[in-house]
Image (cartoon, rainbow, N blue to C red):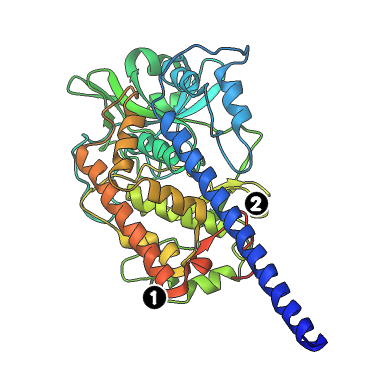
Amino acid sequence: MKLKQRVVLLAILLVIFIFTKVFLIDNLDTSAANREDQRAFHRMMASLHVELDPRLDHTLQSPWEIAAQWVVPREVYPEETPELGAVMHAMTTKKIIKADVGYKGTQLKALLILEGGQKVVFKPKRYARDYIVEGEPYAGYDRHNAEVAAFHLDRILGFRRAPLVVGRFVNLRTEIKPVATEQLLGTFMTVGNNTCFYGKCYYCRETEPACADGDIMEGSVTLWLPDVWPLQKHRHPWGRTYREGKLARWEYDESYCDAVKKTSPYGSGPRLLDIIDTAIFDYLIGNADRHHYESFQDDEGASMLILLDNAKSFGNPALDERSILAPLYQCCIIRVSTWNRLNYLKNGALKSALKTAMSHDPISPVLSDPHLDALDQRLLSILATVKQCTDQFGPDVVLVEDRMTLSHL
């Protein structure tokens, strides 16, 4: 064989070797990532049922100190939380030492301080479990049980971006009124034999109070995030106008996602992928009301999108508001880990997991069966949407590694 032929042959063999090596490494990396996603899923499933137990072994810290130490820029609580049951038990049983009107907002809530100085947000029951909220997808009062269900869905999806929520029964006469501020106390009234209050908020009206069953009121309590992690509020790029006849740009501009990617912090880093995760989360729970969102302050796009205020969810199980998924079907990208987790939850696994996760809660059953059934149906719609994207653009474009920057998009 001539020297020239040998050089050409060696060059061909070298190219084949390089491509084979790269392909094998890529496959090994992908396979390893998939295996870790599967292991994480099994760990989550094994820890779904959380017993509300006051015991805290191997530590002298209070439950509030433990929960505060969990918070980091990319998660509110860690994957493995053996103390979760003790923290949630404290949320639902610790003595209320102060009660005040809720923080600024449109919906009725109360700010409670529990023994040990921990703030929680109390949202009262307004609807029976089987009540159907008609009208726009963001219509109606806040649903306290939706906050509980959304927290556990956050656990199941592996996001860990929602503050802890648990159901709680409070005696308005003996637990709230004696420690209430004058501002809150001034909104209490008696309707029939029931103690009621209407609080202070944009939509709070004396004519529309929340009423207990006698003195006992069912509600949810959400753990306040530590003050050392101040929040920054952002306008959601896919927010609605809330004005009849006026569409937001994303509702008529098919290339809207391209414009979003040209603005900070969506052109690089994790924020756009967080937006898409949140769209999936919101579509599953039926939340079309995320007009703003919060992250940690001065994060330059590095911290997570925190899944706060999920109470405008689970209003109508028969309504699938597809526009909630606009970030997904307009951008056609999704985290590989999110895609894997959604696939693990097919064939009824999502409904079963959420039902198990919520079974320990003091206000169980948290959701009616139609809402649980709706979750499985909505999951199929999400999977079909991603398939449309992969059919159009290919999986290499659509399925994005979790820590990959998005500057190339």
Indicate the quadrant where residue 367 lies: top left
Residue that label 2 marks:
302
Task: Residue lying at the far right in this picture: please name it.
Answer: 3
Q: Front-most of 335 and 268? A: 335
In contact (CB < 8 Å): disc 2 and disc 1: no
What amino acid is found at the position of numbered circle 1 in the picture? Tyr
- 82 in relation to 345, above or below: above
Q: Is residue 288 left or right of residue 160?
A: left
Q: How many marks?
A: 2
Q: Is residue 359 left or right of residue 72?
A: left
Mark 2 or 1: the one toward you? 2
Measured in 3D between alpha carbons, the distance from the residue under mark 2 to the one under mark 1, in whole angstroms, is 30 Å
What amino acid is found at the position of numbered circle 2 in the picture? Ala
Q: Would residue 241 be visible to someone looking at this image?
A: no
Q: Position of residue 314 (x, y in %)?
A: 29, 44
Task: Residue lying at the far front in this picture: please name it.
Answer: 1
Q: Position of residue 186 (x, y in %)?
A: 38, 26
- 114 in relation to 106, above or below: above
Residue that label 1 marks:
252
Which disc number belongs to residue 77?
none
Q: Residue at x 68, y 49 (%)?
A: 298
Tag 1 or tag 2, which sits nearer the N-term?
Answer: 1
Per the image, label 1 sits on a secondary structure element best described as loop
Per the image, label 2 sits on a secondary structure element best described as loop
| Pointer 1 local density, CA inside 10 Å: few below 14, some 14–19, many at least 20 | few
Q: Residue at x 22, y 35 (%)?
A: 129
Q: Position of residue 29 (x, y in %)?
A: 60, 54
